[in-house]
Image (tube, rainbow, N blue to C red):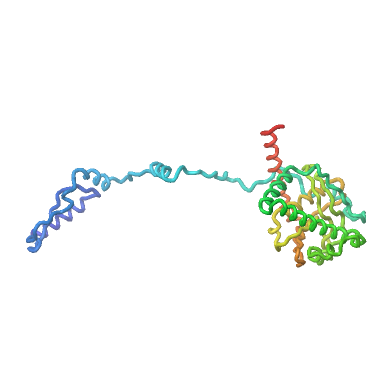
């Protein structure tokens, strides 16, 4: 009976407890004679100052609020790992950047005019050297310094000489083949039979109606100029054709890096240059290989050219803005 009453009392005490612990001297009950007969052993916890830690234990068990706050955690993290670098959040509703310039790739005035071949001799307008953009000069200088560190002065001179001659001879052969076959007789037989020329033989069969070769072009509104390789019909489509040489295969247009931007820059410039009385809507990148393997062709229709034209306008706008800021910061 005594044991039943004791258990009922404990149950009532347990129900009335609400996560609150009060430290009281521990009392144990047992009906075992063995337990009572044992000698009392020294407990290590008896040596601890119970009153000293009673308040701490009480606060931890009874309180519902964590002692650490988000602010304190951030302060600890800053001490351990340094200040947090906040990234710039993208403005809500902002999409991809679009160029503010709305110059069209095509020119309606030329589209309504004659677009037929009226001159059997391809145009060849020389590029004025003193009009090379500053950006292009800086890029060439940086590339030169990097290659000198890698190859040395003598090695760089030999490398650039070989590259220049290979490109020069390759374009001379193409120009002769597309304009005047009689010029081939004046060229070196080794040049004519080079791997690059062999690589593009299957492409030349699809090219006709040449309009321009190695000719300068100037966008009269956007104020940029360049020297394009060729304007001709490729499988019936009038294109700006850019001949590229490579020792590595480039089977996809993404492998040509910024070449599509260069092509659409020429397309837009032709359509806004008064020296050319025709309109171009397409582009073609031909990658010739030194080992003579068949060249890869990357045709750019009008839709693809329009996509790259938007990218080109954005690139040109950023460059113009950067040049303007540099001029403002460092006036002459």
Location of residue 281 (image quadrant): bottom right
The residue positioned 70% from the left and 32% from the top of the image is 331
Quarter of the picture containing the N terminus is bottom left
Nearer the observer, 262 or 79: 79
Q: Quadrant of residue 135?
A: top right
Hey, which residue is sitting farthest top in the picture? 332
Name the spot of residue 133 as percent of width and height, x first: 76, 43
Residue found at x 27% / y 46%: 60
Please identify the quadrant where the C terminus is shown: top right
The location of residue 182, given as percent across then percent down, is 92, 61
Where residue 119 appears, x then y in whole percent?
A: 92, 54
Q: Residue at x 87, y 47 (%)?
A: 275
- Total tally of numbered discs in the picture: 0
In depth, the one of 145 and 197 nearer the eye is 145
Residue 258 shown left or right of residue 111 in the figure: left
- Where residue 108 appears, x then y in whole percent? 82, 48
The one of 227 and 97 positioned closer to us in this rendering: 227
Residue 85 in the figure: left or right of residue 158: left
């Amino acid at each position: 009976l005594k044991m039943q009453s004791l258990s009922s009392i404990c149950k009532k005490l347990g129900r009335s407890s609400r996560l609150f612990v009060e430290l009281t001297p521990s009392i144990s009950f047992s009906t075992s004679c063995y337990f009572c007969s044992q000698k009392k052993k020294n407990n290590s916890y008896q040596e601890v100052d119970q009153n000293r830690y009673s308040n701490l234990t009480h606060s931890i068990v009874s309180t519902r609020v964590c002692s650490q706050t988000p602010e304190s955690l951030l302060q600890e993290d800053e001490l351990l790992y340094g200040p947090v670098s906040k990234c710039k959040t993208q403005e809500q509703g902002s999409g991809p950047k679009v160029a503010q310039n709305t110059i069209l790739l095509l020119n309606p005035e030329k589209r309504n005019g004659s677009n037929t071949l009226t001159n059997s001799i391809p145009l060849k307008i020389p590029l004025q050297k003193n009009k090379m953009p500053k950006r292009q000069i800086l890029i060439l200088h940086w590339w030169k310094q990097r290659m000198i560190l890698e190859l040395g002065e003598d090695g760089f001179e030999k490398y650039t000489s070989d590259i220049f001659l290979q490109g020069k001879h390759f374009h001379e052969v193409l120009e002769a083949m597309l304009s005047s076959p009689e010029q081939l007789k004046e060229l070196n037989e080794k040049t004519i039979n080079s791997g690059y020329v062999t690589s593009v033989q299957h492409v030349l069969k699809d090219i006709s109606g040449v309009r321009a070769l190695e000719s300068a072009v100037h966008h009269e509104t956007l104020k940029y100029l360049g020297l394009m390789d060729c304007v001709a019909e490729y499988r019936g489509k009038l294109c700006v054709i850019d001949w590229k040489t490579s020792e590595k295969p480039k089977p996809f247009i993404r492998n040509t890096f910024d070449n599509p931007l260069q092509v659409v820059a020429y397309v837009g410039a032709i359509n806004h240059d008064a020296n050319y009385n025709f309109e171009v809507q397409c582009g073609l990148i031909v990658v010739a290989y030194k080992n003579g393997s068949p060249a890869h062709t990357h045709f750019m229709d009008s839709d693809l050219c329009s996509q790259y034209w938007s990218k080109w306008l954005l690139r040109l706008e950023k460059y113009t803005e950067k040049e303007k800021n540099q001029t403002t910061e460092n006036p002459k």
